[in-house]
Each structure stands twice: as structure tokens, then as C-alpha cells.
Amino acid sequence: MTIMSYRDALNQALREEMKRDESVFLMGEEVAEYNGAYKVSRGLLDEFGPKRIVDTPITELGFAGVGVGAAMVGLRPIIEFMTWNFALLALDQVVNAAAKMLYMSNGQYKMPMVFRGPNGAALQLSAQHSQAWESWLAHIPGLKVVAPGTPADAKGLLKAAIRDDNPVIVLEGEMLYNTKGEVDENPDIVIPLGKAELKREGDHCSIITSGKMVLVALQAADQLAKQGVNVDVLDLRTIRPMDVEAIAASVTKTNRAVVVEEGWELCGIGAQVVDYIQRECFDDLDAPVIRVHQADVPMPYAKNLEKLAKPDAAKTIAAVKRVMYLED
């Protein structure tokens, strides 16, 4: 195992898969000469050349469409968006072309492609550049959606996404690129899509989460442990398809659940998790499930208001105490 950053783990995944398969290429804004807006593609232009590391104009709809066409003829494009907020302009290609092509062609055209980039809020990027896209994209049949929360998961899930024959959305936490953790440098290690992982074990409550919120949940778990409350922290890792068996196994054990998500409440990923829990574990619940999420407002710019709007460890701790009837 090697300690490396989330950014370097993604870079290693890209390098290994491009060495493994010559049909893989990376395309997006500033991915080549500038090494990527977040330096994820650092050094790849020098190693693989401009035919496989391709700079594009600021035309998200256009280069997403080029990627769809490339996938239709057998290549494996990786489309990088500078931020998923900009990808709003490309959703016609993501939703109406990539997600539906296999179905509409009656299986004639596979879509082995990846759409990836930073997701969610950073610091004071305000309303238009702070959105969490999980629920928007996971709603679409034909897409797979992953949200890695650690460097190891970032590497393993991106490698699995590149090898998959379906379009895969990779949502990289914008505040995670500098975080560090243990990563296996074995190029054959791939994390299968659709499998959650228990990041911490406990028996008092299940905290179910993904992406950047994994760190929030673990911070909350550390503080709760000091108060004698031990929780499961279940990292979904893949949003679609979701690992319902892992959710059920955790909630059946603890009999209580808190779902932590970065996005808004209405129609959020947490609502889907709660639906699975009530279908699979209703008789095992000792308390209603509580969700922790962003406030139902566009993300404020002011620091104090931004802090109030974001889900955090304190709000997660309060939710756990409520489901355990330790607080009103």
C-alpha cells in the first residue's frame, strides 16, 4: 500500500488503463497542456501524446457528442468536465445519446465511455458552481453513477468505469483532491461497480452515505465514539446500481439509520435509500430514518451562510442522537 492523494489516485488509474488499452483516450477542457483544471491528468500528454490526451474548446455539448460518436465506433473515451456544473450544457448528449443508445439501437451500439469531473460544493463558489449532481444523473436508466470518497475508491472505481461497456458517471468530490489515503498500486486491482463498503463498524446506528460525505460521516463517528455511541458507516460508492443488500445488512443489525447526502432534500439520493430501507427493513427499525442534507436553498456565497447550508459532522451527530432518542 502507498499513501497518495485522491488526485494522484485518479491520475494513476488513467495512466494504467491507457497503458492497458490503446482505445482509451481522455478529452476535455485543459486536460492536455494545462494538465487538467485540478491536475488530475498531470504528465499524461507527455506520455501518451495529443491524439489520446485531447484539449477541447469550452464546448461541453460538442466534445461530449464527439465522445458518444467515438464510443459508438469502438473507442473508450473519458470525457472530463471542468466541473459537473458546466456539464449541464452537455446533458442532451449524456442523457439522450449516451444513456439511451444501447436501448434505442436494440443492442447494436455499446457505450463504453466515462463522464467525470468535480462534483458538489467547494468553498465560496456560490449558487451556480456548488451543486451536487447525484440525484440528477442517477435518475436516468442507462447510466451508472459512482461517487468515490477515498483515494483507493477513486482509483478502483475509475478503473472499473473505464472497463465497463456502459456509460459511467464518475462524481469526484471537489474538496477531496488533496485528501490522502492508502492505495494499492497493483494495476489489476479494480473495485466492482455496485458494491458498497463498510468503512466503520458499530451496532447503535447506521450512517449511510457516499462521496465527500464519507469523510463527514467518519468525523461524526469518531466524535460519537467518544460519547459511547458506535455506528456503522456504510459508503455506497456506487449510486446506481445501489447495493441494497449492504444497506439492509447494516440496518437490520443496528435497527436505526441516518442518511447523509451532499445535495438537496427533495427527490435526493437519500430519499431512495430511505425507500429501500422501508421496503427491506421496516420491521427491523426502532426509529424513523433521518436524512442530513443541504438546506433547500441555492448555495450562498457568504461564509457563514454557506456553513449553515452544508451538511456537516455536527448535523450528522445530532441526527444520530435523535434516532437513538438521546435528544429531542
Image: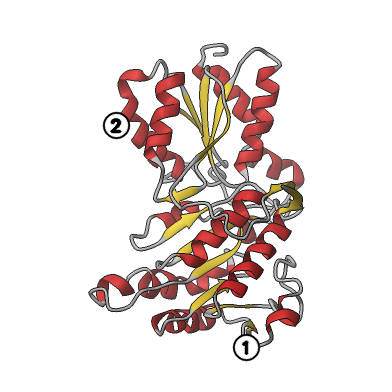
Q: Which mark is residue 88?
A: none
Does residue 229 sit above or below 274 in this rendering?
Answer: above
Residue 142 x/y as whole percent = 35, 63
237, 266: nearer the viewer: 237
49, 21: nearer the viewer: 21
Disc 2 is placed on an element classified as helix
Residue tagged 1: 51
Residue 22 x/y as whole percent = 56, 80
> What amino acid is found at the position of numbered circle 1 in the picture?
Lys
Residue 121 x/y as whole percent = 65, 52
Disc 1 is placed on an element classified as loop
Q: Quadrant of residue 311?
A: top right
Residue tagged 2: 279
Q: Find the residue positioned furthest to the bottom.
A: 51
Does residue 25 sit above or below 95 in this rendering?
Answer: below
- Label count reads 2
84, 24: nearer the viewer: 24
Compute the Cα span from label 2 to label 1.
49 Å
Nearer the camera: disc 2 or disc 1: 1
Q: Quadrant of residue 105?
A: bottom left
| Res 83 visible | yes
Quadrant showing the C terminus: top right
Q: Find the residue positioned furthest to the left.
A: 106
> What amino acid is found at the position of numbered circle 2 in the picture?
Arg
